[in-house]
Image (cartoon, helix red, strand yellow):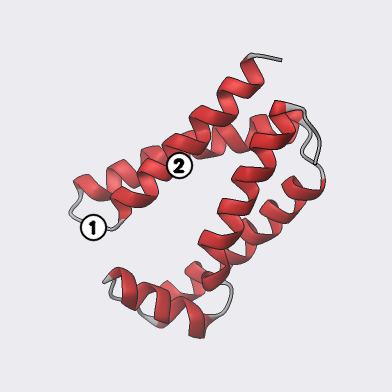
Amino acid sequence: MTQDPVARWGRAGALYDFVASISFVTPWTAALALDLLGTPHTSQTLLFATLFGTVVVMWSIVRWLRPQPLLIAADTAGRALFSVWFTWALLQGHTPALAGFLVLELFWGAAQLRALLRR
């Protein structure tokens, strides 16, 4: 693995995203994951969860294979937006399990931003 901090943090964030999202790639595994999170779901919820899971898994593979600063910067901005939406969902009374995801998004966003700014 390269010693470039942007690539290192970008790949680490990509690995986290892959692991956190792989269970949302099929409706069957997404239903299990949502049950574990205590989140009620419908067929429409499962559709959006699998679309989200597929996109995040594909995006994580791209960042793992090509951890270029532009891609890591785009991912960092995305993490900031995800953090806003996780915060909004928590304030709306959604499952407290989202707090764990929020903390991890903030961590990976801060780590990647720090590496980008130190370039």
Which residue corresponds to mark 2?
105
In percent of the image, x 47 and y 76: which residue is there? 30
The residue mark sitting in front, 2 or 1, is: 2
The numbered dot on residue 23 is none
In percent of the image, x 79 and y 33: which residue is there? 68
Which residue corresponds to mark 1?
94
Q: Quadrant of the N terminus?
A: top right
Identify the mark nearer the N-term, 2 or 1: 1
* Label 2: few (<14), some (14–19) or many (≥20) C-alpha neighbours in 10 Å: many
Q: Name the spot of residue 18 as percent of width and height, x first.
A: 61, 59
* Label 1: few (<14), some (14–19) or many (≥20) C-alpha neighbours in 10 Å: some
| Residue toward you, 77 or 45 | 77
Specify whether residue 67 is in view.
Answer: yes
Distance of label 2 from label 1 (alpha carbons): 17 Å
Mark 1: secondary structure? loop
Q: Are marks 2 and 1 in contact (CB under 8 Å)?
A: no
Q: Name the spot of residue 85 as percent of width and height, x first.
A: 37, 44
Mark 2: secondary structure? helix
Q: Quadrant of residue 40?
A: bottom left
Against 30, residue 14 (above or below) is above
Against 113, residue 56 (above or below) is below
- Left or right for 53, reference 1: left
Specify whether residue 52 is in view.
Answer: no
In percent of the image, x 67 and y 52: which residue is there? 60
Hey, what amino acid is under mark 1?
A: His
| Residue toward you, 72 or 115 | 115
Hey, what amino acid is under mark 2?
A: Glu
